Structures are given as structure tokens and as C-alpha cells.
Image (cartoon, rainbow, N blue to C red):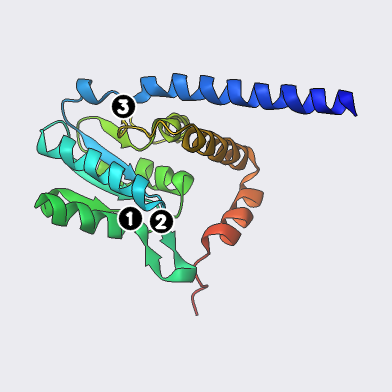
Amino acid sequence: MRWLRRIVFWLIILDLAATALFWGVSRFMDQSRALTGGTGVVFYTDNNKDAAARIAKAVNLLKAGKLDRLYMVGGHRPQEGWLGSQEMALIAARGSGLGGRISADVESRDTISGLKNLARNAKTKAPGEIVFVSNCMQVIRAKVIYNAQPDHQPSVMGACPPGDLNPLDIWRRAHYEAGAWVLYAMPAGWRDAVLDRLRGADAPAE
């Protein structure tokens, strides 16, 4: 059994090292200081603490003139009758008083569908940059997925709220992202089936 303990030990060490490396590299995704305008695309999360941090980051950038408008995506949960992006947009509008510059995609249920809608939605194709507002680990994935869309804009930047330095939280985020990358790599049919189970699917039209 000693060999098994050694394998488990080294797997844990490799896992922690990979998590630390991923977290360190992701910090370069925050380009808040370089922003001069554009559309801030804020990704929905059902983690209330994370959602509040993303909204606060986006609103602060909007008020500072570093973003021109905000566009919330994700969180469409048909099984629960819930529109997460719309709820985040309402919170941002109430807190900022800038509701006329804040809107939401009420169809996207996850990062992938949100980015596909973003690429083909004419409303988001105004001149200027697109800025993804989320935790830095998700921004990496969002940029890769968005750049794979045929109608994407060439200029994409990132803005991340101050991260929680709790090691358990960093580990959780990193492994959530690992699962999300696996999901993205699946064939579209498999991926949609998993998302239908996790997020819910719209009822068929009668």
C-alpha cells in the first residue's frame, strides 16, 4: 500500500502546483487600468458573493468612464423560471443610477451560449472594445471560446474583481474551470445534454 500512498501524495502535490500556476497566470487577465471604453460583458454566477463583486467591479468601471455600457449574460434557468442576467442588470441599474446603459441577454444559460449570442448580437457590435468582467480564471476560458466564434470582434480585454485569496476558494475556482474546459471540449450534442440536465431546457413550443 506504500506505493499507493506515494501516488496519491504526488497527485495531490501536482494538483496543488497546477492550481497555483493557473491562478498566477490568470492574474494577467485583469486589464482594468488600460481600459478606455467599450462594452463590459458581465457573466452571471449563482454565487452571491462572486456576483456582487462582478457587479461592483463593472459599475465602478462604468462610473469611471472606463466602460461605456454593461451587458449581463448567462443565468437563464427555465426549470426555475429564473433570468439571472436580468436580475444582475437590475441590481447594477439600481446601484448605479445608470440603467439606460445597462442591458441583459435573457437567453444565455451559460458561458458558451452567452458568448455565442454575444458574437452574433448586433447590439454588442458598436465601435469599441469588448471587456469581459468575471473572475480571471473564467476570463481566460471566455476569451478562447469567444475568439472561436465566426463573428467575434478582434479586440477583447478582461477586468477582474479583487480575488479572494482564500486557498480553498482558489482551489474551488480552478477545479470548476477544469470541469468547464472538459465540458467545452465535448461534442456539441453531449455538451447540450449535460447543460440541459444542469441548467434546464426551454419547454418545446406547442
Residue 4 in the image: state x and y as whole percent.
85, 28
User: Of the residues under marks 2 and 3, which one precedes in the sequence?
Assistant: 2
Does any portion of residue 87 appear in the rendered image? yes
Q: Amino acid at mark 1?
A: Ser
Which residue is at a point 60% across and 40% down the rendered structure image?
A: 179
Residue 153 in the image: state x and y as whole percent.
33, 31
- How packed mark 1 is, by other alpha carbons closer than 10 Å (few <14, some 14-19, many 20 or more), is many
Q: Nearer the viewer, residue 85 or 202?
A: 85
* Displayed quadrant of residue 54: top left
- Given contact means CB atoms under 8 Å apart, are the residues at marks 2 and 1 in contact? yes
* Displayed quadrant of residue 131: top left
Which residue is at a point 53% across and 34% down the rendered structure image?
A: 171
Q: Kindly identify which residue carries mark 2.
A: 75
Left or right of residue 176: residue 102: left
Which residue is at a point 41% across and 54% down the rendered structure image?
A: 46
Is residue 53 placed above or below 22 in the rendered structure?
below
Residue 85, numbered circle: 1
Left or right of residue 25: residue 127: left
Left or right of residue 103: residue 173: right
Q: Amino acid at mark 3?
A: Met
Q: Nearer the viewer, residue 74 or 53?
A: 53
- Given contact means CB atoms under 8 Å apart, are the residues at marks 2 and 3 in contact? no
Residue 157, numbered circle: 3
Element class at badge 3: strand
Residue 173, numbered circle: none
* Displayed quadrant of residue 197: bottom right
Q: Nearer the viewer, residue 160 or 121?
A: 160
